[in-house]
Amino acid sequence: MSGLRRRTAPALSMAAALALVTAGCSGGDDSSGLPADQQGSGATAAEGDGVRLGILGQCEGPFGGFHEDVVAGTTLALTRFAGATPNSSTSALDGFSDAEAAGTPIELVGVGCGDDTADRVLQEVRLLVEQMGANVIIGPLSGDEGMAVAEYAKANPDITVFAGISGSQEQTLQVRAPNYFRFYGDGAIWNAGLGDLLYNEQGWRRVAVIADDYSFGHTSAAGFIADFCAVGGDVTHRVFPPLGTTDYSSYIAQLPNPDEVDGYFWAVGGTGTQSALEAFINSKGDVTGDQHAGNFFFNPDLAQALGSDIAGAHIGGFATLPGDVRTPEIEEYLAAADATWESIPGSLSGNEPAPPSTAAAFGFFYGYYTAGVALVEALEAVDGDISDVEAFQSAISGLTLDLPYGDISLDENRSGVVDVGLSRLAVDDSGEIVQETVAVVPGVDQSFGGTFSPETPSPGRDFPACDERDLPWEGQAVPVVDGVPQS
C-alpha cells in the first residue's frame, strides 16, 4: 500500500484496508492496479483538471478471469479515439498514457479489483474516488456490484459512472442514479426472443429453469421466463443455486426428469456452468441440444467437456454477436485490438497469451469498450469542458453510439436500448462445435414490453410470474442465415 497517497485515509475502515491489500492481483505495486510511477496524485474528485479515470475490474471470484479483458476494452476505445498509448504490448493492466479527447486529458488513476461482492466493490470504488481522486468510473463487471456502485453514484453526484458489463436490472431501473449510465443491455434484455423461438420453432411447452441465486442470475432468468410465458409456455420449476456453488447435485435433484418437461433453461455462469451440467449428466443422463438452452455462458467450450450432443442448444444474446456475423465495422474493431497489443491473456484463452481479438469478440471486453467510446463522445459533445458536471452528464444521456455490433442509445433511466442476437450450437464441416447466429431481435429496452418498471418487484425467485402478454418482438425477430441478417 506504500505507493498510495492517502489524502482521505480515514474514509476507509481497517477491514477495507486489509481487503485492499489482497487486491493486488492486478499486477501493479498495490491495489491501484498500476505501477507506482503511474498512479494518480490522490486528488479528490473535485480537484484538478481533466478526467481522472478509475476502472472497476474483477480479479477474484467467479469472473476473476476477465480482469484483463475489461481493462483492455476501455484501453482499446481510448487508443482508437483518444490517442492513448498502452504501456505494455502484452498486458492491458499496465495502463495507458497520453489519452486526450476534445483537448481534455484522460488519466488512469487506478484499477479496482472486485470479487463479485457488493462489499468489496464499494471498498474499491471508494479507494478510487476518495483517495485517488477519480471523477469518472468505468465498471463494474457483475450484477450485485452494479447495484452497489449505482447506489454509491447516487450518493456522490459529482462523479460520473459508465457501467462496465454488470447485467442486473436494478442498477438502472430501480436505483436510477442520474450520474450512472449503461450502454448495453441487462440480463433480461439479452434473453428477449429466446422463449418465443423455443416455443414456436422448437415446440417447447413446459420448461424448468435453473439460475444463479443473485441479481444477474435472477435478471437473466426473468427475461427468459417473461418471454417464454408471454407466448403461452409454462415454467414448471425454478431452482436457484448460490453463485460459486461447487457441488450442484442437490440442486439438480430439484429439477424434473427429462421426460417431464420439454426443456431446461440454464443461467448458471462463471465457474459453475460446466460443473452444473456435469452434475445434471450424473443425475439425469446425457445433455442433448434439443432439450437445453441457456444464457450467454452456454458456449461452444462446453462441448469439450460434454461432447457433441450439446449441438442444437439455443443461447440468448450478449453485448456482442457470435463470430459468424462479420461486417466491415466488426472486422475493423477486431483488427484494431490485434494492432494495439501483441497478445493479451484473456479468460477465453485460459489467461494464456492470445490474439487480443479473441477477448475483444466477447461481451466482457466489449462492454468496457462501449463505455470508453461513450466517455470520448461525451467529452467531444461538451468541447472537453467537464467543469459543469450536470451539463456533461446531460450530454451523455443524449448520446447514440455508432458501434461495431450496432447502435446503442439510452432510455429515460440511462440504460441501453439494444439489438439482441440469438444463436445455437452447431457442428461445423470439421466436426467442431461452433456458435451460429439464428436471429436478431431489434430495439429491446429494459421495460421488456411493459413487463418491468420501477414499480414492479426486482427480478427474483418468484418474479416475474408466468403470464401470457403481448411483447413487441413476438414473431418479429430477423432471421440470420450464414451470418447475414435477412432484412
Image (cartoon, grey):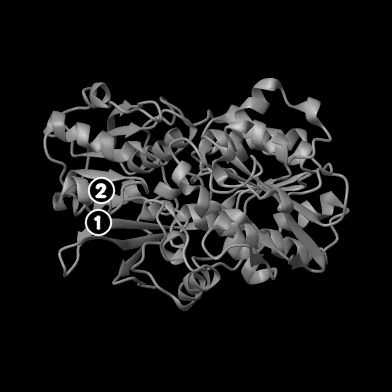
In this rendering, the answer to whether 486 lies above or below 186 is below
How crowded pointer 2 is (Cα within 10 Å; few <14, some 14-19, many 20+) is rated as some
Q: Residue 478 placed where, x, y %?
A: 37, 64
Residue 213 visible, this orientation: yes
User: Could you tell me which secondary element the residue under label 2 belongs to?
Assistant: helix
Q: Mark 2 points at which residue?
A: 302
Q: In which quarter of the image is the N terminus?
A: top right
The CA distance from mark 2 to mark 1 is 10 Å
Q: Residue 230 placed where, x, y %?
A: 37, 41
Q: In which quarter of the image is the C terminus?
A: bottom left
Taking 99 as reference, is 76 left or right?
left
How crowded pointer 1 is (Cα within 10 Å; few <14, some 14-19, many 20+) is rated as many
Q: What amino acid is at disc 2?
A: Leu
Q: Do the residues labelled 2 and 1 touch (CB within 8 Å)?
A: yes
The residue at 60%/58% (across/down) is 74
Taking 390 as reference, is 400 left or right?
left
Whichever of callouts 2 and 1 sits on the residue coming sooner in the sequence is 2
Q: Residue 369 placed where, x, y %?
A: 57, 59
The residue at 55%/58% (across/down) is 73
In this orientation, which residue lies closer to the viewer: 436 or 276? 276
Given the current orientation, which residue lies at the most extreme bottom position? 328
Q: Residue 286 placed where, x, y %?
A: 12, 40
In this rendering, the answer to whether 93 lies above or below 259 is below
Q: What amino acid is at disc 1?
A: Leu
In this orientation, which residue lies closer to the viewer: 57 or 141? 57
The residue at 84%/35% (across/down) is 7
The residue at 37%/55% (across/down) is 349
In this orientation, which residue lies closer to the viewer: 462 or 294? 294
Q: Name the residue under label 1.
A: 425
